[in-house]
Image: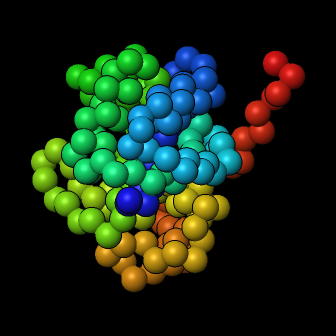
Amino acid sequence: MNKVYLSIGSNLGDRESNIASSIAMLDSFDEITNIKSSSFYKTEPLFNENQPYFLNIVIEISTTLSPFNLLDKIKDIENMLGRDLKREKNQPRTIDIDIIFFGNTFISTKELEIPHPGSIFRKFVLKPLSELIPNEIFPKTGVKVVDLLEKCPDTSVVEKYIIDKKA
């Protein structure tokens, strides 16, 4: 069983529902158990600022899937939730699911890089990740997640998002 951390974000449509649906779909696989979630965070878009704000979370899962089998399931979920798989980089999207790290696995291929190479420079990943595992060492860095967040050069707005349960 591997402990895996996924970053999930949405900035099109019903963002809360998109994220909840992706988690429910992940939970439907027998090979994925023990899902734990960070709080939701409202995050300013990076790179292409001419788009709506994102909602982001990080989840922890336990899985017996291989990294590439998990990636295939993630792509299927993104497709089912309306993500255009041929879209340009940094464009608005209904759902985006990235593998941040996967146990002690290191992969560097055209299709998949683990740990996710940009995650240590993205506050929208580090803030929710530090909520789940602040004192864990981020793979390949030798640095605690909370310390990476503190030193993160990303100055974008990332703030806790309160879900209106009355709606």
Residue 139 visible? The answer is yes
Q: Residue at x 27, y 28 (%)?
A: 88
Q: Residue at x 72, y 41 (%)?
A: 161
Q: Residue at x 16, y 59 (%)?
A: 108
Percent from the top left, x then y, of residue 131? 64, 61
Query: Which one is nearer the viewer's eye here, 131 or 64?
Result: 64
Percent from the top left, x then y, of residue 121? 42, 62
- Against 1, residue 42 (above or below) is above
Query: Which one is nearer the viewer's eye here, 21 or 161?
Result: 21
Q: Relative to 117, is 53 on the left or the right? A: right
- Against 35, residue 95 (above or below) is above
Q: Residue at x 81, y 29 (%)?
A: 164
Residue 119 visible? The answer is no
Quarter in which the N terminus is drawn: bottom left
Name the quadrant containing residue 128.
Answer: bottom right
Quarter in which the C terminus is drawn: top right
Percent from the top left, x then y, of residue 59? 53, 49
Query: Which one is nearer the viewer's eye here, 66 or 6?
Result: 66
